[in-house]
Image (spheres, helix red, strand yellow):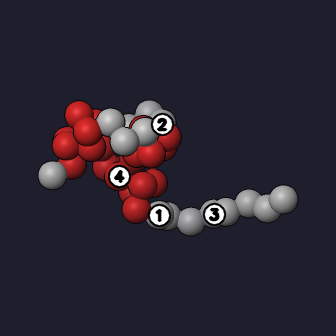
Amino acid sequence: TGFAWGMGVERIAILKHGIDDIRSFYENDIRFLEQFN
């Protein structure tokens, strides 16, 4: 087991846009993803 600490693209977007859950990026919901065009 291990830990990953870092500021990935997803984490920066979460902070910038106030997203609650990082899993939202990986659900492939086009309505969610279109917000970031």
Q: Is residue 18 visible?
A: no
Q: Which mark is residue 33?
A: none
Q: Which mark is residue 13?
A: 4
Q: Earlier in the sequence, mark 4 or mark 3?
A: 3
Measured Cα–Cα span from mark 4 to mark 2: 11 Å
The residue where tag 2 is placed is: 21
Q: Earlier in the sequence, mark 4 or mark 2?
A: 4
Q: Residue 30 vs residue 11: left or right?
A: left
Q: Position of residue 29 (x, y in %)?
A: 32, 36
Of the 4 image quadrants, the one containing the N terminus is: bottom right
Do residues under tags 1 and 3 come within 8 Å of each other at their CB atoms?
no
The label nearer to you, 3 versus 2, is 2
- Badge 2, how many Cα within 10 Å: few under 14, some, many 20+? few
Query: What residue is shown at x 26% (from left), y 39% (from top)?
Result: 30
The residue where tag 1 is placed is: 8
Label 3 element class: loop
The residue where tag 3 is placed is: 5
Query: What residue is shown at x 21% (from left), y 49% (from top)?
Result: 36
Measured Cα–Cα span from mark 3 to mark 2: 17 Å
